[in-house]
C-alpha cells in the first residue's frame, strides 16, 4: 500500500516514512502517487508531441514546393493520418490528464487521487497504445492512411496496421475513461470539507465537466471503431454499401464522439487560463459563477453540433439549419469566457511573466480560431470551404494556439511548484515570442490557401498555391525548432533542478491551496484534510 494509507500522519512525519515509497525504477513503474503519475503523463505527452511534430515537419517538407518532392502519395496520407491521431490522443489529451493528476489533489486539498492503482494502470495503458501507433509505420502496407477521422470505406481497404490503430484507440479510450472516473470521484468525494463546489478552483471545475464528457463519448468512439473492425474481419456490413451499410452512418457516429472530443481538448485549457489570468492581473477572476455555467453550457451544447462536420454529405436543409444554429449558439458561452478573461485583466495591476504571455497569446489567437469556426458553421460557406486548408487553419488555431499554448502557460505557472526551481524568464519569453510568430507564419497563410480552394490532405497542388505553401513550411520548421528549444533549454534544466530556488508562492497574485505547501511539492500532501478559511484558498489549521 502507499505510505499515505499506512500512516495517517501529519506533515511533520513526512521525512520519517518517505522510505516506504519505492525508489529507483520501481518508484515510476509502481507509481501510485498522483505527482509521479502526473509527471509520467506529462513526459509521455511531450514525447508524443515530438513524434507528432516530426510527422508534421515531413508533411510540410513535402508541401514546400509543388510536385512530388520526397515521398509517395500513400506515405503522405499515412503521415497526415498519424500526425492527427498521435497529436490528439498522444500529446494533447495525456498532457491535460498530467496537469489534472498533478494539480487537482493539491487544489482540492486531497491526499491523492481516489483510485491510486487505477491511476497507475490508466497511465501504463498509454505506452503499448503509443508504441502500436508509432509502430504501425513499420507494418506491411505502412500506417493507417484513412485520415485521423478513420472514415469508411477507406478503413475497410487498409492493411493490418488499421487493426493495430483500432486496438490502440480502444486502449487509449479505456485509459481516458479510467482517468475520468478517477478525476470525478477525487473532486466530488475527496475535497476538503471546507471547500464547497462553488469555491473550487476553476481548473477543477473544467476538468470535472471534461471528465463527464469523456465518459459520455469515449464508448461511442469504441463502438465506431469496433464496427469498423467487424466490417473488416467478420463479414458485417455496417459501413459497406454493398451489404446494405452506409459509410455516412460512420461519420455520424464518429462526429458524435468527435465534436465533444474537441471540447475535451479545450475545456482544461480554459481552466488553466482562468487560473493564470487572475494571478498576473492581481485580481479575482471576473464572473466565477458565469464561468462555471458557461463551461457546463459548452459541454451540453457540444452534443448537438456534431453534423456541422458533415454539411457536404447531402443532409436535408432542415438538418443543416439546425446544426448551423446550434453551432452558432455554442459561440455564446465561449464568448462569455473570453469576456470574463478580458474583464479580469481590466484595470488589474498586470505583469507579463511567461505564463501570462502564453495566456494572453492564447486569448488572442484562440479568439481568431473561434471566429473562423463561426464562419465554417454557416452551411452555405462551409460547403465551399469543406475539406480545404481553411479548415486546417481553423482547427490548428484552436488546438495549437488553444490547447498547446494553454499547456505551456500551465507549465510555466506550476513548474516552480513541481520542480522547486524557477525556469529562466528570458528563455521563457524567447520561447513564447518564437512560438507565437512561427505559429502565425505557419497557419495564417492557410486561410488564404483554403479560400482560394486548395484541398486538405493532398500531396501535390497547382502552381498558384506555391508561395503560401512555402511560407507555411518555413513557419512550420521554425515552430518545431521552438519546441525543441523549450525542451532543451527550459524543461530539462528545471527537471535537473538547475535555476533559482522557487519560493513557496513564486507569483504574488496567485491563489489556491497549491501555494500553501512548500516548493517542490512534498511527496505526500494533505494527509489530513486541511482546515480552510472562508474563501477556501488559504489553510488556517
Image: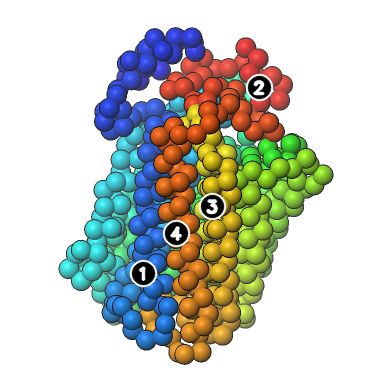
User: Which numbered dot is residue 58?
Assistant: 1
Mark earlier in primary sequence (4, 3): 3
In the structure shown, which secondary structural element does the residue marked by tag 3 occupy? helix
Judged from the image, the secondary structure of the residue bearing numbered disc 2 is: loop
Give residue 431's mark.
3
Q: Nearer the viewer, mark 1 or mark 2?
A: 1
* Direction from residue 272 to residue 14 in the image, left or right: left
The residue wearing badge 2 is 538
* Residue shown at 61% from the left, 27% from the top: 505
Residue indicated by mark 4: 481
Q: Residue at x 64, y 72 (%)?
A: 375
Q: Horizontally, is 75 left or right of 344 in the view?
A: left
Classify residue 208 by image quadrant: top right
Residue 114 at x, y percent in the picture = 44, 28
Q: Residues within 10 Å of mark 4 (few under 14, many from 20)?
A: some
**Residue at 58% from the left image edge and 42% from the top image edge:** 425
Q: Which mark is residue 407?
A: none
Q: Tell me if I can see residue 273 in this picture.
A: no
N-term-proximal mark, 1 vs 2? 1
Give the quarter of the image for residue 437: bottom right
Of the pair 80 and 326, the residue shown nearer to us: 80
Q: Is residue 28 above or below residue 10?
A: below
User: Is 40 on the left-hand or right-hand side of 277?
Assistant: left
Amino acid at each position: 500500500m502507499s505510505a499515505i494509507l499506512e500512516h495517517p500522519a501529519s506533515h511533520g512525519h513526512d521525512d520519517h516514512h518517505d522510505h516506504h515509497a519505492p525508489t529507483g525504477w520501481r518508484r515510476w513503474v509502481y507509481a501510485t502517487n498522483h505527482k509521479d503519475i502526473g509527471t509520467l503523463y506529462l513526459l509521455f505527452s511531450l514525447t508524443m508531441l515530438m513524434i507528432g511534430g516530426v510527422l508534421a515537419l515531413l508533411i510540410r517538407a513535402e508541401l514546400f514546393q509543388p510536385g512530388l518532392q520526397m515521398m509517395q502519395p500513400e506515405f503522405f496520407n499515412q503521415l497526415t493520418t498519424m500526425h492527427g491521431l498521435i497529436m490528439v490522443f498522444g500529446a494533447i489529451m495525456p498532457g491535460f490528464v498530467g496537469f489534472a493528476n498533478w494539480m487537482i489533489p493539491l487544489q482540492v486539498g486531497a491526499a491523492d487521487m481516489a483510485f491510486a492503482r487505477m491511476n497507475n494502470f490508466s497511465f501504463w495503458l498509454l505506452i503499448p497504445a503509443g508504441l502500436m501507433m508509432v509502430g504501425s509505420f513499420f507494418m506491411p502496407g505502412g500506417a493507417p492512411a484513412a485520415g485521423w477521422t478513420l472514415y469508411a470505406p477507406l478503413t475497410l481497404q487498409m492493411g493490418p496496421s488499421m487493426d493495430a490503430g483500432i486496438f490502440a484507440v480502444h486502449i487509449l479510450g479505456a485509459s481516458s475513461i479510467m482517468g475520468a472516473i478517477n478525476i470525478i470521484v477525487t473532486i466530488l468525494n475527496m475535497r476538503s470539507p471546507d471547500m464547497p463546489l462553488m469555491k473550487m478552483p476553476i481548473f477543477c471545475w473544467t476538468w470535472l465537466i471534461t471528465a463527464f464528457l469523456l465518459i459520455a463519448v469515449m464508448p461511442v468512439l469504441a463502438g465506431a471503431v469496433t464496427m469498423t473492425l467487424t466490417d473488416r474481419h467478420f463479414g458485417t456490413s455496417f459501413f459497406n454499401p454493398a451489404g446494405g451499410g452506409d459509410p455516412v452512418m460512420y461519420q455520424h457516429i464518429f462526429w458524435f464522439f468527435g465534436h465533444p472530443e474537441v471540447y475535451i481538448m479545450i475545456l482544461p485549457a480554459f481552466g488553466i487560463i482562468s487560473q493564470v489570468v487572475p494571478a498576473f492581473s492581481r485580481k479575482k477572476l471576473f464572473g466565477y459563477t458565469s464561468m462555471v455555467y458557461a463551461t457546463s453550457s459548452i459541454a451540453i451544447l457540444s452534443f448537438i453540433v456534431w453534423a456541422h462536420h458533415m454539411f457536404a454529405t447531402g443532409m436535408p436543409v432542415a438538418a443543416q439549419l439546425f446544426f448551423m444554429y446550434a453551432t452558432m449558439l455554442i459561440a455564446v458561452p465561449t464568448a462569455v469566457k473570453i469576456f470574463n478573461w478580458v474583464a479580469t485583466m481590466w484595470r488589474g495591476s498586470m505583469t507579463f511573466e511567461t505564463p501570462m504571455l502564453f495566456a494572453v497569446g492564447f486569448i488572442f489567437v484562440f479568439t481568431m480560431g473561434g471566429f473562423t469556426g463561426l464562419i465554417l458553421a454557416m452551411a452555405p460557406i462551409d460547403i465551399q470551404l469543406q475539406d480545404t486548408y481553411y479548415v486546417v487553419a481553423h482547427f490548428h488555431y484552436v488546438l495549437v494556439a488553444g490547447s498547446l499554448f494553454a499547456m505551456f502557460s500551465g507549465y510555466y505557472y506550476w513548474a516552480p511548484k513541481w520542480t522547486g526551481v524557477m525556469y529562466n524568464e528570458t528563455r521563457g519569453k524567447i520561447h513564447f515570442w518564437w512560438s507565437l510568430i512561427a505559429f502565425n507564419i505557419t497557419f495564417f497563410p492557410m486561410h488564404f490557401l483554403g479560400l482560394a480552394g486548395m484541398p486538405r490532405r493532398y500531396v501535390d497542388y497547382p502552381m498558384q498555391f506555391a508561395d503560401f505553401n512555402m511560407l507555411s513550411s518555413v513557419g512550420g520548421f521554425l515552430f518545431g525548432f521552438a519546441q525543441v528549444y523549450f525542451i532543451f533549454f527550459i524543461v530539462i534544466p528545471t527537471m535537473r533542478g538547475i535555476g533559482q530556488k522557487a519560493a513557496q508562492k513564486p507569483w504574488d497574485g496567485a491563489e489556491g491551496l497549491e501555494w500553501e505547501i512548500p516548493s517542490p511539492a512534498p511527496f505526500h500532501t494533505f494527509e489530513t484534510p486541511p482546515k480552510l478559511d472562508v474563501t477556501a484558498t488559504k489553510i488556517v489549521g
